[in-house]
Image (cartoon, grey):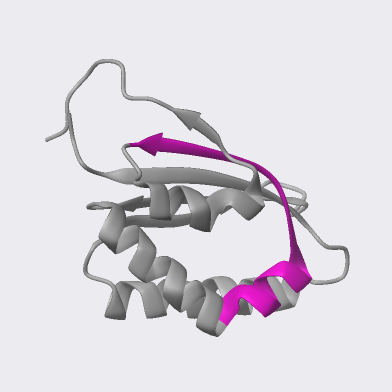
Amino acid sequence: MSKTVSWLLEMQVQEGHASELKALMAEMSSGTQANEPGTLMYEWSLSADGTICHLWEQYVDSAAALAHGGTFVAKYAGRFLSVLKPVRCVVYGSPNEAVKQALAPFAPVYMAPAAGFSR
C-alpha cells in the first residue's frame, strides 16, 4: 500500500464571504503549489449555489501533510475559519499519529486502506 495521506474536507461557506473565499482559495493554491513539493493534489470545489466547499488534498506521506499543516496554521487558519465552517473531514491512507493530532480539530473519520493500488 501507498504511504500517501489524503483527505476531503467539506465546509459551509459563511454567508457574505464569497469574494474573500475566492481570494483565499487562489492564495492558498498558489502558495501550496509553489512551496510544497510533497503535495500531490490540492483541489477546491464549490457547489452550484456557492454554499458548500470541498477541499481535496493528497500528500506523498505524513511528513508532507505536516509541512502543509504548519504553513496552514502560520499563514491561513484565521482567515480560513472566518469564511468557512468545517462540516466533515474524511481521511484516507496511512497518516501517522502527528497527522491525526493535527487533524483532530476537524473531527475526522479515518478510512483505512483495504485494497487497490497507486500508480
**Residue 27: percent from the left, percent from the top?**
50, 80
On the picture, is 84 further left or further right than 76? right
Viewer can see residue 77: yes
**Residue 29: percent from the left, percent from the top?**
44, 71
Say if 40 sits above or below 8 in the image: below
Say if 116 sits above or below 56 in the image: above
Residue 21 lies in quadrant: bottom right
Residue 111 lies in quadrant: top left
On the picture, is 58 further left or further right than 84? left
Viewer can see residue 46: no
Between 75 and 103, the residue placed more toward the observer is: 103
In the picture as drawn, the residue positioned furthest to the right comes out as 15
Q: Residue at x 11, y 35 (%)?
A: 119
Q: Residue at x 37, y 63 (%)?
A: 66
Between 11 and 115, the residue placed more toward the observer is: 115
Between 78 and 16, the residue placed more toward the observer is: 78
Q: Residue at x 24, y 52 (%)?
A: 61
